[in-house]
Image (cartoon, rainbow, N blue to C red):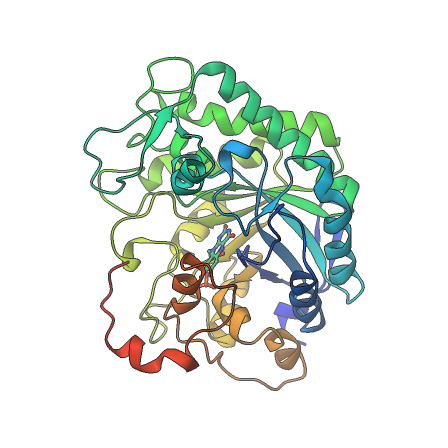
Amino acid sequence: MSILFETMKIGRLRLRNRFVRSATYDGCADKYGHVTEKQIHLFEELARGGVGLIVSGIASVHPSGRISAFQNIVSDDSAIPGLKKLVHAANAHGAGIALQLFHGGRESAVYQKHRKSEAVAPSVVANDPYCDLEYRTMMEDKIIEVIGAFGDAAVRAREAGFDAVQVHGAHAYLPSLFLSPFTNLRTDAWGGSPEKRLRFLHEIYKDIRTKVGDDYPVMIKIGVADGFPEGLQFSEGKTAAVRCAEWGFDAIEISQGLRGKRYSQTEFRTKIKGPDQEGYFRPWCRQIKEAVKVPVMVVGGLRSFGMMEEVIRNRDADYISLCRPLIREPDMIGRWEKGEGGTPSCVSCNLCFEALLKGISLHCAYESSISLRRSRSDSI
Ligand SMILES: Cc1cc2nc3c(=O)[nH]c(=O)nc-3n(C[C@H](O)[C@H](O)[C@H](O)COP(=O)(O)O)c2cc1C
């Protein structure tokens, strides 16, 4: 049997293999942010397809952090009945399921404006070449309120039956904005030194842990470097990841922080044509895995089965986390387990992501858009 199909544990959570469906926004929630039949079907399909752990898409913990009208919320109790159904869809077919706890920060600006509100961030960056959104600086009372909202959301997730939660601490969203010296220009207790920029995440962790108890699995997806040279550097991001492990996060998924202007500067890179482009965050994982005792998940362009086995054998990571290949082929893991399958047919074109931005729900948009794809450049 392949090392990828060993049974695993994250805290008290038992998993049938080392495969994780990395968090994937699906744009399928109803107008209240509640779970729909379409999502239940999607999660059932993934769980039947053999993945060990499914991380949900971004679930908004606070109204100020909601990014889309089609996004799930976990900011009040009305979401719990639907979330219970999602848990059942995964667990009934042998998969574990975690809810991803999310606040969009300034990235929520368009949706917030639509609901006549303003997006928030640690500070406003003047003449930011990477962001032309309108947003305002968070007052301290708002910071405290949002931290509490993460904890309350984790309690709701536990009540709905989720096996774990994952804090979204990457990709230009609120915790990532606090961590980066490029977007956190505060001079109070929430900004300045690396430790002060990390404080927001630490308080979120403590609030969640106090509210859900010691034995509930609490994970993080952390952006350990920004996608452009003036941003967060890996040396500092690595320390942040190590701190997360020391505080008590039960597993750490390694990704990037703020996005640059091109796909090559984001967490979802294109042009993955061979082993040299595969597993683009693997070097970061290796260094972090050496320094922590908790399980590490590698995400980002993992495509060939042989390389995934090698990542584990080499102790660069403990889990293989996949997003785009499972949009196209949700049954891929099960086929690999049966010895069928080969390399995923996902071409990492990101048309799935671009369709979501237009309000079209999650699907592999490659087949229907081959001609469109040919005319596209590498810019977002
Ligand atoms: C359509 C789409 C939706 C995504 N939604 C989320 C999300 O909700 N939360 C998150 O942390 N990452 C999200 N990501 C990033 C993925 O989880 C993953 O980190 C990235 O795509 C790299 O992995 P891959 O090469 O296996 O796709 C999304 C990516 C895509 C393409």
Q: Which residue is drawn at 34% across and 43% down?
A: 258
Q: Residue at x 44, y 37 (%)?
A: 112
Work out which quarter of the rendered image holds the C terminus and state it: bottom left
Residue 367 pos. (x, y %): 43, 82
* Residue 242 vs residue 269, the one in the foreground: 269
Note whether 250 is above or below 265 in the view shown.
above
Measuring 70% from the left and 25% from the top, which residue is drawn there?
210
Residue 220, x across and y down, in percent = 56, 42
- Image-based side of 10 in relation to 367, left or right: right
Q: How many marks?
A: 0
282 or 73, which lies in front?
73
Q: Is residue 113 left or right of residue 226?
A: right
Is 206 rendered above or below residue 300?
above
State whether residue 166 appears in this view: yes
Residue 164 sits in quarter = top right
Residue 14 on image: x %, y %: 75, 55
Indicate the quadrant where residue 234 lies.
Answer: top left
Q: Viewer-proximal residue, 363 or 341? A: 363
Place of residue 2 in the rendered image (x, y in percent of width and height, measured from the top left): 63, 74
In the rendered view, does 86 fall on the left or right side of 309? right
Query: Residue at horizontal 45%, vertical 52%?
Result: 285
Q: Which residue lies furthest to the top in this view?
A: 188
Question: Does any portion of residue 316 appear in the rendered image?
Answer: no
Q: Is residue 317 above or below residue 125?
A: below
Residue 254 versus residue 21 in the image, above or below: above
Q: Which quarter of the figure is the N terminus placed in? A: bottom right
